[in-house]
Image (tube, coloured by chain):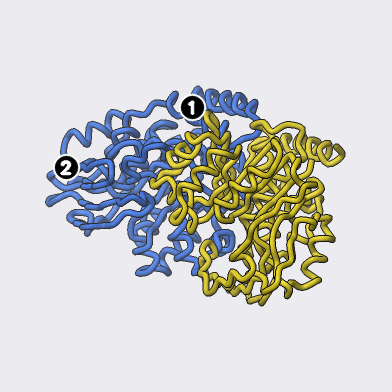
Chain colours: A yellow, B blue
Amino acid sequence: MSVLVVGSVALDTVETPSGQVSDALGGSATYFSLAASLYTEPIRLVAVVGEDFPSECLRILRDRNVDLLGLEKKPGQTFRWVGRYGDDLNTAETLATELNVFAHFDPKVPTEYRRTPVVFLANIDPGLQLKVLESVDRPRLTAMDTMNFWISSKRDQVTEVMRSVDIVLVNEAELRQYAGVRNLSVAARRVLDLGPRAVVVKKGEYGCSLFAEDRYFAVPAFPLDDVCDPTGAGDSFAGAFMGSLASSSSLGWEAMRQAVLHGCVVASYTCESFSVHRVSQLRRDDVERRLHRLLSFTQLDSTREVELNHAIQNAAQA
Amino acid sequence: MSVLVVGSVALDTVETPSGQVSDALGGSATYFSLAASLYTEPIRLVAVVGEDFPSECLRILRDRNVDLLGLEKKPGQTFRWVGRYGDDLNTAETLATELNVFAHFDPKVPTEYRRTPVVFLANIDPGLQLKVLESVDRPRLTAMDTMNFWISSKRDQVTEVMRSVDIVLVNEAELRQYAGVRNLSVAARRVLDLGPRAVVVKKGEYGCSLFAEDRYFAVPAFPLDDVCDPTGAGDSFAGAFMGSLASSSSLGWEAMRQAVLHGCVVASYTCESFSVHRVSQLRRDDVERRLHRLLSFTQLDSTREVELNHAIQNAAQA
């Protein structure tokens, strides 16, 4: 099942205790696309880059069969983000944001993309997210992400997007900020009350919680000895989550729980390298191997692993 | 199987966003004993109180069949702790610590307690923890907790206790402090390298991670809509964890994983009231009911719940 993502494609300069990279491929839609492409195709990317966007970055996306019809090239420079992580790899310090061509991003969904059944609105201006929702034709599944900047500056529009989608994916801190309450269950319920079927709360090294009206599921993160660079982990989570759902025969609770597990696994790989290095090289059997380990770390009954493996293989063949 | 705990019995004055209590029953050994008493008996308490210690507090412990032979009453006042929690209920601000009779606590293990098979060294001076270990006769299972104060002031003795016990239970922040590294897996391995069979990392609202030499298990916390007062949650966790192990026919990996689940459940109840109100009223069927819910929140295969329930009932009958 095809997946449409609208978000940023960027060049990131990142410093972490493990080292640094300059002008490396980044952006929410990039990480999302590379992760989702492990599960289904085509992944249809709507984003904007500048004239300076390196052809090797395009090749990384094309190598994963990401459909680039919706990737506009505009006069000017590509969006750049400069950030630094200290020992606490949960929080990035933004040193510079050069929006460049992204400042006037006006996502145009190509006619060929209008009937995409799965739509993900990555973190962009909520006004643009609403515009994208209006330009697609009755998708089966829609989801969104957002960030602190939009929650404080365009709260009403963020609310409007939340009302309009099936699933809200959000960081723990941003969920708390939006709901104005620290308790995560209470905060998630405030979002559920707006209408989405599920709220997926990304908690970094603490894993993920999935809230639905009368159901709850939580999974700890895959433990890593060496977190190189967490940039893009949340967007990779979203890509694997949505890709897993798009490749599933159902969009029900069981499919969502499995999608959360896949999100955690792919996000953990993303953290193991700078930029998209690891996630762009990832193969489906890497995911399955680590998924088995995650299950053995969190599930009492390991026979379940075998069942799930069959489900994965069936999905991959479908 | 009997359990010996050495730690503090205190009177706590606590303020949280939900309200406040004054001179309410508290202390690490208190919470531990009340939680452990759900699983096995006798729980043998070695601690000290002052002449002012209220008889109703003694009754709370006696009502749970806690053996008070080792509870010394000394001239002077009982240990008092005054603390406050803000919206972030993960961290207490200590407003006052009046050690009183606890300042000269010199734990004396009664002769009748020397052959206790399960020994828990709650958070006290590591020199005293070592002394207690020397005064017991080949226990089957020993475990310890500690805190930031001892890690910074008596690090070598903390290390010595870690070398001497089977299981180290510790807060996430204190494990990081001890190991001098932020990555939890790496930090846990540094402690495992000292010799204990397992390291249990208490992560508050994020649940618990269990590390052994070549194994790992993690469980998210039971989600609470309303955290009244987290004081004693970690000590209740330890009590349920050790009580569950003491009531188990094995001390192996499977028993430890189940003990972690019980720890999370009982700790969650403790957070629902001030002081020991909830944990002292708790019954085994409350624990089982919430355990089932925790499993449904974290386990893909809910048939496992039934199996576990049988195991619990068998253990309770044994």
Describe the element under mark 1 as helix, strand or loop: helix
**Mark 1 burial class by Cα count in 10 Å: few <14, some 14-19, many 20+:** some
**Mark 2 burial class by Cα count in 10 Å: few <14, some 14-19, many 20+:** many
**Mark 2 and mark 1 on one chain:** yes
Task: Determine the chain carrying the residue at label 2.
Answer: B
Residue B210 appears in the rendering: no
Q: What's under tag 1, amino acid-wise?
A: Glu
Q: Residue furthest right?
A: A317
Write down the quadrant of residue A23 in the picture: bottom right
Write down the quadrant of residue B156 in the picture: bottom left
B7 on left or right of B186: left
Q: Identify the residue position indicated by label 1 in the image.
A: B288
Q: Nearer the viewer, mark 2 or mark 1?
A: 1
Foreground of the two, A85 or A131: A131
Q: Which badge, 2 or 1, is on the more N-terminal residue?
A: 2
Task: Determine the chain carrying the residue at label 1.
Answer: B
Identify whether B130 is placed above or below A228.
Answer: above
- Gap between marks 2 and 1 measured at Cα: 33 Å
A208 on left or right of A6: left
Q: Position of residue B290 (x, y in %)?
A: 47, 30
Describe the element under mark 2 as helix, strand or loop: loop
Q: Which mark is residue A290?
A: none
Q: Residue at x 77, y 73 (%)?
A: A54
Q: Residue at x 46, y 38 (%)?
A: B223
Q: Position of residue B39 (x, y in %)?
A: 44, 32
Identify whether A28 is placed above or below B241.
Answer: below
Residue B288 appears in the rendering: yes
Q: Identify the residue position indicated by label 2 in the image.
A: B53
Q: What's under tag 2, amino acid-wise?
A: Phe
